[in-house]
Amino acid sequence: MTRHQFPRMRRELFRTNTVPALHQGDPVEPEGASVDDVARPVSSRKCTDDDARRGSSRSASLPPPLDRLIPPRWAGDYERFSGGVARTVGKRIRALAVPDAEHALALAEAGGKRLRPALAYLTAHLGYPDQPRLIAAASTVELLHLASLMHDDVIDDAGTRRGQAAAHVTLGAERALLVGTGCFAAAAKLASELGNRINRLICDGVIDLAYGEVLDVERSFQLDLPIEDYLKVMRRKTGTLFALPCVLGGVVARLSPVRLRALSRFGEHAGIAFQIADDCRDLTVTDGAKPAGTDHARGLFGYPTLCALRNSPTDELQHLLTRLNPQPSAPEELRGHVRAASGFEHARDAAHTHLNRARKQLGECPNGEAVAALHAFTEWIDARVPA
Amino acid sequence: MTPAGSLDTEALIVGGGPAGASAAITLAAAGLAVTVVDAGRRSTGDAVVLSPPALGELDTLGVTGLLSLIPIRHGRFLIRDRATVAATPDAAAGVTERAALLDALLDVAAGHGAHLVNGTVTAIRTGNHGAVGTLTCPGDTVTITARTAVVATGRAPSELGLPHHDDRPGGAAITRRFHHPRRDDHFDVHLPITDLAGSTLLPAYGWVHPDPAGGIRIGLGIVDDRATGLIEDVFDGFVARVTGGSDAMPRGTRITGDLRHGFAPHRCGEGAVLLAGDTAGLVNPFTGEGISYALESGRLAAEAITAANREQEPAGAAEHYTRILAGRYVGQFEASRHAIRRYHLAWRTLDATAGDDTPFVVKARQAMLLPSGLRRRSPVQRHPRIDPIKPMLLACDEILLATVRDTWPFLARLVTSGEGVLGTEVRPARLMLHAARVGGRPVDCPTVAAAIELGVLAAVTGLSVRSTSPPAPDGIHWGNNVAILAADFLLARGAALVARSTTDLSWAFADWLEDLAAVRGETARGYADPHAFYERLFEFPCRIGGALGGSGVRHGRALREFGARFGRVIGHAEDGAALDGRPTRLESSVDTLIGTGVSAIERWWSAIRPGAAWPGVAQLDPGARRDLLAHGRARYREARQLALDALAPLPPCGARESLAGLVTVAAPASYASPGPSVRRE
């Protein structure tokens, strides 16, 4: 159907009876800061790449790791942006007709690193973004992230998330699933208010994300998963939620197609590196977020483990991984085997490779504070890979 | 007039097994000059089970009369030794000796005038004027040319020098006859099979059936070529398990063979050479069923050839054939190492959901296991009128297929089973397309219809997520997880279809998802009206249809009201069918419908027995059941009348008639009319 055959329909016609009249679905409410206080930070070239990489400049008021990423002079502006995202996300979740939505709200307010909105903010500042649109676009990504976290926690049977009991522990699988679906619906609504282009980008991202989740469960417990297959899964599962905010920020700032493509690849490679770092941390770091070895007990063998399985001269690691399943108490032993078969070294190399590819993409963008900050972001991922 | 050392024919069939013979009979009956090259065979004493679809094909070929069949009256799938799906839901099956079946097929082919040649084709390729093969007969080698060739040797196409794809056998099978006191007419398929330690699930299945030569035949198939080394040991373990150890005496030899299940439609027709049967990789990886697919694909190849000949374009046969195959076998078979991962997941899910009869699980199980898939009984009679929306419905199905075929083929099987998600007549797409006709504006919106179908399938899939279902022995809720993944995947696809085709509807689509999630959430907390789910499910297609078709405010409101009331009609029809023991659209029992929160039966109960607690369907005495059914029928008739009344504001038109027609086919006429139990009241 062509557009002139199909005049824009009044949303009123589509409203269901149950939705409380909290919001009318008007195109993009400027829920963040008012236009006055969102003047773009004065573009300055004083902060060089090297400064950012050394971490010499920090935005003291921002929580880590954002204090290293956001240039200090932008901190105030960033806080207004981030407050706008938090308000939009909160407002959209509160407007949901789905019961138990307060669990999504609690999850949203519990913090997390908020990397994805930050990425959108940084890529948007490669150009001249419209702040309300940027806030709305970043909020869709945050809502999608929340939806995927809630569904992931049901699938992984995770007990805690962001330091709290996961929603499904209190609600049960079905109700937690529905809250997650509600968040997805909220994201889709917000996306539809941002125009065709952004809407399509977000929908395509969601397809990749959902398919990545399918592939990840399909490959569970496969000991001889080829590394290239693993990377394909992770490009979708983790890469998408990094690439999407990068591209959305760029679209809001009206960057050229070449730069958008570069930003998409930047996000994907950074996402894969982030995932590899996470895989390593599943075996080594117990930071309270989740007990070590959780992924491995679910058959989701990470990058270092898959490499170690290929290099390992004995079958011990294989036996350990199949035995681990009923009694997930052997992360130390597992770590030892992976280390002995130089799994961590391979993982570190792979993370470096992907981070370098990500950095290379930044060559398409004009040098400046935003690019320096994106470089700092890759450095931060690099530092996450356990030594 | 062919030069010495060469042979020319219209159609060359390589291999005289079920697929080759089926093609030969169909072609010869159509009047083509057919040559069948077959090496003949040693009698191995093997027996084959003929499923209802296979018997149907044999009947079409005129072969059934020549066979002596041991009847199979009960076919079962035993998952962890629990019967879950009837393997032969509505028709008879039988066992016969493999050699007898093949002889009968070739006899019929010869009877139709096919020329049988005893020999082997060692190479075949597409030449300038058709297929060119090298035929090796005892003491002679000749060149054989044909306009088209069908290769059905049952072995890898690369053995004949055809383009080499990844055509290693996907697995192996083994069978043996045993002397056993058990003499019954059961055909049991056991899933899943574990390794000898009993801890690791293997992508394998076992089967047991009576043997024509007496005793029973036990078989085992493994569909992962990395695990086929274990097959002898696993087979021994399986034999011990089904026979109870001691009283089974082996008779005859072990018969082993490759399982070729790497089907990919585009590889089955290149140039003048078509592949059929096992050579095409058409073996169900979950049950080993291959005969019905062999017979069917042979016939389809023959039909493609005759159609191409009729159009004077013999070269078009390959394209024709691959297109038919793609439509017919979508999602059932797959090649690639990725497919093996899918099978592992499917196995775990089958295993973990053995006792589950929620809609998605049941539909998925049937789609995977039954040779006829979901193409089975239709709970409603067909709507006789000529259907003005048919072209758009077909377009909608094509979009559905294209959307999920490459990424999750198994779901493609679910969404395009020819019946939609909930049965042909009451598909939401149909409702939407009829509603769109009301406004009079010409509408071409199969994409939106497809998105709505995906949304409905996602909602039905979500019904299978339970908070209480017990996890599998490995501690993972495979059933829940697959349902969640499938629902998310379908929603993502649906939302993207809308965004790409009719962006203005994106917001409404998202709003519908929120609404469905809200209704389910209320149900989970015990607040919602049980039929509200159906109400929301069907209101949306009518609303969107009305808006797309340009209906005004008044008609639009009437269509929405109709959609909601239509949903309640479906709800009452489902409850009544479940209570009556008839098949339901959601494939669920009364207990499951109640447990899922989409059944009003408990409310019916408190209406007829105020104050009494719902005793559970098993504890209903016949009198109470009769009363309950009568009450349900009355509610159903009320709902039906309300739905028809909702159409009153619409102008008299074909679309209104069609919508009214959908209401009348929501339940069988016998249910809708006042039944005997009602008249007794």
Image: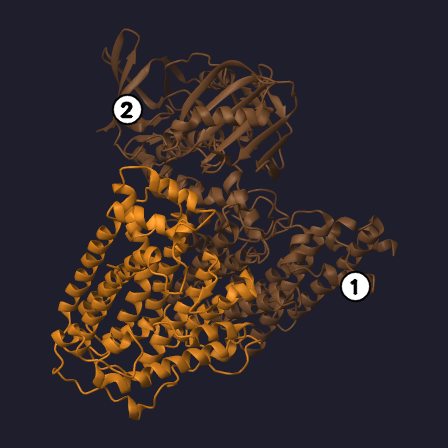
Comparing A317 with B457, the one in front is: A317
Comparing A7 with B139, the one in front is: B139
Q: Which chain carries label 1?
A: B
Mark 1 packing: few (<14 Cα in 10 Å), some, or many (20+)?
Answer: some
Q: Which label is found at residue A186?
A: none
- Determine if residue B301 is in view: yes
As drawn, the chain in orange is A
Q: Which residue is drawn at 25% across and 42% down?
A: A311
Q: Where is residue A43 in the image (x, y as percent from the top left)?
A: 16, 85
What residue type is disc 1 on?
Answer: Ser
Is A221 rendered above or below residue B26? below
Does B653 sit left or right of B450 as displayed?
right
Does A50 sit left or right of A121 as displayed?
left
Q: Name the residue under label 1.
A: B606
Q: Residue at x 28, y 57 (%)?
A: A276
Mark 2 packing: few (<14 Cα in 10 Å), some, or many (20+)?
Answer: some
Q: Which chain carries label 2?
A: B
Q: Where is residue A58 in the image (x, y as percent from the top left)?
A: 22, 80
As drawn, the chain in brown is B
Q: Do labels 1 and 2 share a chain?
A: yes
Q: Quarter holding the C terminus of chain A?
A: bottom left
Badge 2 element: helix
